């Protein structure tokens, strides 16, 4: 019991130090805005796991992580996981990693395959939805489900390969709908997803969310 109490006090101290540093960085008013937002992340792979860590480092405290898959060695070249987490559910492994950044982060994990029949329910209480899916049909379905809901929707298209990283741009489709990528670099045998461009896109997704929240619904 004493060990648990010590661990609990340690987590509270880390959380206090982390939040105080963030308040100094963002300013109190902006910190409060970020703390109030719940972000849903559809997919916990290269985009989703890295976008999640950027958001937590920016002070976002409420996340919903949805992914049915497990960590594989082939993921470690670009995803926010470690070798000892291979075979774990991605949502559980990612939850653990994010808690290493901020022990007080509140994460709902949904270890399910997303489809048009469950997306709305999974992300119902989120003001923001990040699309970080591999399947083209699922990507389309997510846009169809959320585009007219008023939630901020941030998707990605064209992030594979290497080089020409300046082509990975933020494109505004609507006030609440943004696409990140170069729109042409699809994943293939000669154009694999690798860490630099994947992380650039994930960081841009997180930056759109942060800008939208701090800008009062615009970036």
Image: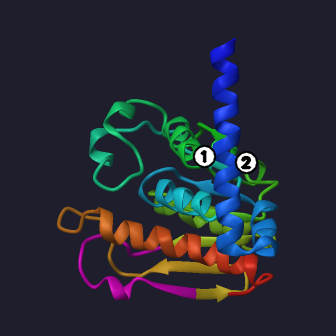
Q: Which residues are magenta?
A: 157-171
Q: Secondary structure at mark 1?
A: strand
Location of residue 125 in the rendering, given as x and y in whole percent from the top left corner = 82, 54
Observer able to see residue 102: yes
Observer able to see residue 141: no
Location of residue 65 in the rendering, given as x and y in whole percent from the top left corner = 62, 47
- Between the residue at mark 2 and the residue at mark 1, the CA separation in whole angstroms equals 8 Å
**Location of mark 1 (residue):** 66
Q: Which mark is residue 119?
A: none
The residue closer to the viewer here, 159 or 149, is 159
Residue at the image point whose x is 69% and y is 74% from the top: 26
Q: Secondary structure at mark 2?
A: helix
Residue at the image point whose x is 54% and y is 43% from the top: 100
**Location of mark 2 (residue):** 122
Q: Is residue 41 magenta?
A: no
Q: Is residue 81 above or below residue 154?
A: above
Say which quarter of the image contains residue 181. bottom left
The residue closer to the viewer here, 61 or 45, is 61
């Amino acid at each position: 019991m004493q060990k648990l109490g010590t661990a609990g006090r340690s987590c509270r101290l880390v959380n206090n130090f982390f939040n105080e540093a963030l308040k100094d960085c963002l300013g109190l008013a902006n910190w409060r805005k970020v703390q109030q937002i719940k972000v849903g992340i559809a997919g916990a792979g290269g985009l989703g796991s890295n976008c999640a860590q950027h958001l937590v480092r920016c002070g976002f405290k409420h996340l919903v992580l949805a992914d049915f898959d497990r960590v594989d060695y082939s993921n470690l070249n670009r995803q926010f996981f470690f070798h000892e987490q291979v075979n774990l559910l991605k949502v559980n492994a990612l939850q653990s990693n994010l808690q290493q950044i901020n022990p007080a982060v509140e994460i709902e994990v949904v270890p399910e395959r997303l489809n048009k029949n469950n997306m709305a329910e999974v992300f119902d209480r989120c003001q923001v939805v990040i699309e970080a899916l591999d399947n083209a049909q699922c990507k389309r379905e997510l846009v169809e489900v959320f585009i007219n809901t008023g939630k901020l929707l941030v998707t990605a298209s064209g992030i594979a390969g290497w080089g020409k990283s300046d082509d990975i741009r933020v494109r505004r489709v609507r006030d609440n709908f943004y696409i990140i990528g170069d729109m042409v670099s699809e994943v293939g045998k000669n154009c694999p997803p690798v860490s630099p461009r994947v992380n650039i896109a994930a960081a841009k997704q997180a930056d759109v969310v942060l800008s939208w929240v701090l800008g009062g619904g615009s970036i």
